[in-house]
Image (cartoon, rainbow, N blue to C red):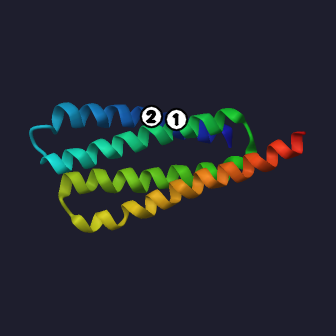
Amino acid sequence: MPFNTLFFGSLLAATGVALGAFGAHGLRHLLSPPALEWWHTAVEYQMWHALGLIGLGATRIPELRWASALLGSGTVLFSGSLYLLALTGLHWLGMVTPLGGLLMISGWLAAAWQMRHVTRQSQ
């Protein structure tokens, strides 16, 4: 679990930097201001959750696999839907974004729950 979480978190961080640069330099004259905001929000959430995944993986606590899976899938859905919305203008994609957000929230709650139990067991 830790290797996969560290790998996926690092991959999300690398693509987040690349997509952030692409948005700032390659898309700023092509997208509308709202679309650029969607892009920026997608990059911001992707980077924060990439760092969160790296942190969870670094704990080397196997019980955090569900939290990591929820965070990773939520990030892909949340940020991915915003990237696609910005590029295509297909507004129905905006209905996918909250599902990704719900998965991310669930991932953090699952991490808190598991950490509570892990720290109790180690005392």
User: For mark 2, does the 10 Å Cα neighbourhood hold few (<14), some (14 to 19), or many (20 or more) residues?
Assistant: many
The image shows residue 113 at horizontal and vertical percentages of 71, 53
Residue 22 quadrant:
top left
Give the quadrant of residue 85: bottom left
- Callout 1: helix, strand or loop? helix
Quick check: 123 left or right of 50? right
Quadrant in the picture for the N terminus: top right
Vertical relation: 46 (above or below) 74: above
Question: What's the residue at 81%, 45% (across, down)?
Answer: 118
**Secondary structure beneath label 2:** helix
Kindly identify which residue carries mark 2.
Answer: 13
- For the residues carrying marks 1 and 2, which lies nearer the camera in this image? 1
Residue 6 image point, x, y percent:
59, 35
Front one among 16 and 102: 102
75 in relation to 20, above or below: below
Residue 17 rendering spot, x and y as whole percentages: 36, 31
Report the amino acid beneath label 1: Leu
Please give the label number shown on residue 7: none
Quarter of the figure with the C terminus: top right
Q: Amino acid at mark 2?
A: Ala
Please report whichever mark, 1 or 2, sits nearer to the chain's N-terminal start: 2
Residue drawn where x is 36% and y is 52% of the image: 80
Q: Are marks 1 and 2 in contact (CB under 8 Å)?
A: yes
Residue at screen point 61% across, 34% down:
55
